[in-house]
Amino acid sequence: MRTSHLSFPRYLDISFSNLIAFLIGVGFPVVVLWWKQTVRSVLGRTPADRFNLAGVASVLIFSFAGLFTHETERIWLFFVPVGLLAAASWIGRAGGEGFALRGSLERRLLEWTMALTFMQTWLMQLLLFTIW
């Protein structure tokens, strides 16, 4: 996109549309778990925490760089693993020894979250391979 013909409201429209399209494409369970892992990553000092924060920064930079129009779905496909890795990290911590689940309700919630994340990822790939 040429920036000389871009007004500020149009820039904001494209940037937020790209960010929202990415979050919708990644899916609600992954976005929630990614957010939880990002909150933990802000306080952490491990390489995995830095990787997660770099992924968040990359998504925001590419959303608001003004380099793309509304046709960025193929670009966002490269960022999906960043969200999935963070969600998997949160699931690993929640199901592991570091985060004790106190009852069967929490355990079932974790299992449903894992199942929804798997189904969403699998269905998205199926749609990409067949329809898109």
Image (cartoon, helix red, strand yellow):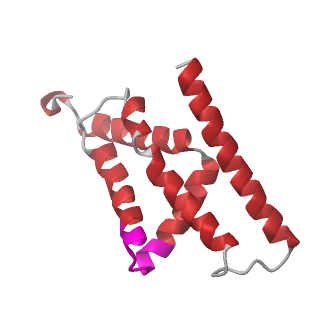
- Name the outermost residue toward the top: 131
* Magenta stretch: includes residue 80: no
- Name the outermost residue toward the front: 97
* Magenta stretch: includes residue 44: yes
Seen in the image, is 2 located left or right of residue 52? left
Seen in the image, is 110 located left or right of residue 81? right
Q: Position of residue 89 (x, y in %)?
A: 55, 65
- At x 12%, y 31%, the residue is 4
Indicate the quadrant where residue 27 lies. Answer: top right
- At x 44%, y 80%, the residue is 43
Residues in magenta, as a range: 40-50
Indicate the quadrant where residue 71 lies. Answer: top left
Seen in the image, is 66 located left or right of residue 15? left
- At x 21%, y 31%, the residue is 6
Image height check: is 42 above or below 57?
below
Q: Position of residue 94 (x, y in %)?
A: 66, 72
